[in-house]
Image (cartoon, rainbow, N blue to C red):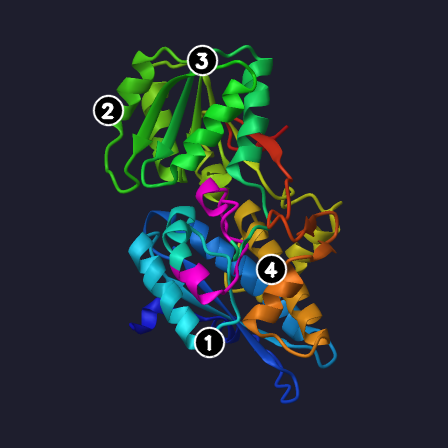
Amino acid sequence: MKRRDLILGGSALFAAGWSAPARADSPLVKFGQSASLSGGQAAYGTDVRDGVLAAFAAANKADGKGPRFELVTLDDGGDKERCKANVKKLIDSGVTALVGLTSGAAAEASLSVIEEHKIVMLGTASGNMGIRSDKLTMAYHVRSGYDDEYRRMVTYVKEFNMQRVGYVYLKDTSPANQAAMTAALDAVGIKLTVSVPLDRNQKSFDDEVRKLLDSKLDCVLFTTNSHPILAIVAGMSAAKYSGFYFSSSFAGQALINDMAGKGQSIIVSQVVPRPNAVAFAVVKRYQDDLAALGSGAKVGFTSLEGYIAGRVAVEATRLALKGGGVSRARFRDVLSDLNVDLGGYRVRFTPPSPQGSHFVDVVAIDRNGRVIG
């Protein structure tokens, strides 16, 4: 394993000017993360990691003799096989659970290993429906799936009487995602006009732009990372396309940052509160904990999603310790009926359902890159 591929939560915190106080009588609980810290989704993966680290750092600073938390993060570059190999390494290293994986497709590719070893995969930063099958026993979600997001998007499509709808998605992701989009549209009596799959590593999107333009669409719905959206919106706008653009949360904070100065607007579904909405106690605490982390961690939707996953891991660990220990099995048992209000954002699991939240917000990014609405 190359040194640059291994990032230890404790080391990252120490480099930022803080290290967890030594508490010899407190148990050390390690969590594993495979994240896209390089490649096209590097900003997304880094933000999720920083959010988890902020939650763990705050827990480690707390007074008393509670557990100490450490995050072991391996870079997968958004690649399925690298993620699967990372998951195996993390399991073999003895982590209690996996937290905050950053690619839904890569997490889905790792499910067989996760289910075989009976280790919890908590808070994957993706709405991917392929990791939400009723047959799975170890995947627990602290955010909404794409089915919830699509239903919210389609409400606007219907309200504004848009009939010709295009759907753009990554072709290496689960077919369950497209099925969820189709179901959401069917529920309001709309049929997809065109579906356009992408290769996440392709360099040009000219063919996709032409296909979308030729379809004479009222709106385009995206479920991709930020880069393809920016390229396609630029191409369609250059051709004077006047319809609407919608994006799922997959595009992350990067889309909001990158749309600034582009002169285009887009409607985006989000699965956590707005990161400046300090009326939510969880947001105020997130801002404080992220600032304390330092190391260039950035406030935004994506790091807040990671923070929420980290907070849920902390709460479940503390409850597990009250029962005597934090084995993988004990962690899962506690998580399966966890009900926690983090400060205006509730995560509730029940034995039949590992879907802890159905929160969806919708924001608009205006032509100046500002979040409005």
Does label 3 or label 2 sit earlier along the sequence?
2
Residue type, mark 1 in image: Gly
Q: How many numbered marks, from 0 up?
A: 4
Asked which secondary structure carries label 1, the reply is: loop
Compared with 2, 83 (above or below) is: above
Mark 2 near mark 4, Cβ–Cβ under 8 Å?
no
Does label 3 or label 4 sit earlier along the sequence?
3
* Residue 339 x, y percent position in the rendering: 72, 55
How far is disc 2 from disc 4 in space, using C-alphas? 41 Å
**91 displayed left or right of 352:** left
Is 355 included in the stretch rendered in magenta? no
* Residue to which mark 4 is pinned: 290
The answer to whether residue 198 of the structure is visible from this angle is: yes
Does label 1 or label 4 sit earlier along the sequence?
1
* Residue 62 x, y percent position in the rendering: 71, 73
Mark 2 near mark 1, Cβ–Cβ under 8 Å?
no
Q: Residue 218 has which mark?
A: 3
How far is disc 1 from disc 4 in space, using C-alphas? 27 Å
How far is disc 3 from disc 4 in space, using C-alphas? 40 Å
